[in-house]
Image (cartoon, rainbow, N blue to C red):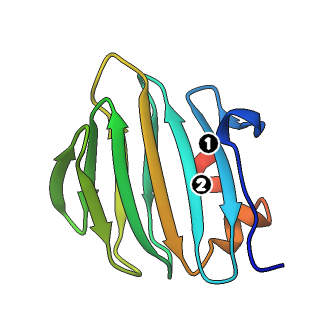
Amino acid sequence: MPAKKYRWYEMPAEQVTDTFSRKVIVGMNEMFCWLELKQGCVVPEHAHENEQISHVLKGRLLFVVDGETIEIGPGESLLIHPNAPHSAEVLSDETVHDYDTFSPPRADWVDGLDDYLKK
């Protein structure tokens, strides 16, 4: 099949924690994810072989990438290179809506082996 259409509003969200949910589209070479992060959400420091681009639609996120603190908000994106240790935290009182892209796809997310998120 050369193409497949997705409707975010029809896709069920996976509730990873009480403050983190996601919807995931997995292609052959990349993964595109819709994330909803509520106030108090902290993604602990981790690293992965995948290149990552995070793009905030609503709210503010504070990233620490390889020791550097970077804040992004609506209309801003952050490129994280493969194997860079990083963490993220919701800064705003409002729920953050974010798109993340990974290349190659995150096998740990696909296989449910992302226990670092569920602590």
Residue beneath the point at 69% across and 82% down: 28
Mark 2: which amino acid? Answer: Tyr
Q: CA distance from mark 2 to mark 1?
A: 6 Å
Residue 111 drawn above or below residue 105: above
Residue 92 in the image: state x and y as whole percent: 28, 23
Side of 112 where 42 appears, left or right:
left
Side of 80 where 101 appears, left or right:
right
- The residue that disc 2 covers is 116
SS for tag 2?
Answer: helix
Q: Are marks 2 and 1 in contact (CB under 8 Å)?
A: yes
Residue 97 in the image: state x and y as whole percent: 44, 35
Residue 62 drawn above or below residue 110: above
Residue 59 drawn above or below residue 63: above
Mark 1: which amino acid? Answer: Lys
Residue 84 in the image: state x and y as whole percent: 34, 75
Q: Quadrant of residue 53?
A: bottom left
- The residue that disc 1 covers is 119
Residue beneath the point at 67% across and 54% down: 24
Quadrant location of the N terminus? bottom right
Side of 52 where 48 appears, left or right:
right
Q: Quadrant of residue 67?
A: bottom left
Which residue ends up furthest to the right in the rendered image?
1
Q: Nearer the viewer, residue 6 or 107?
A: 6
SS for tag 1?
Answer: loop
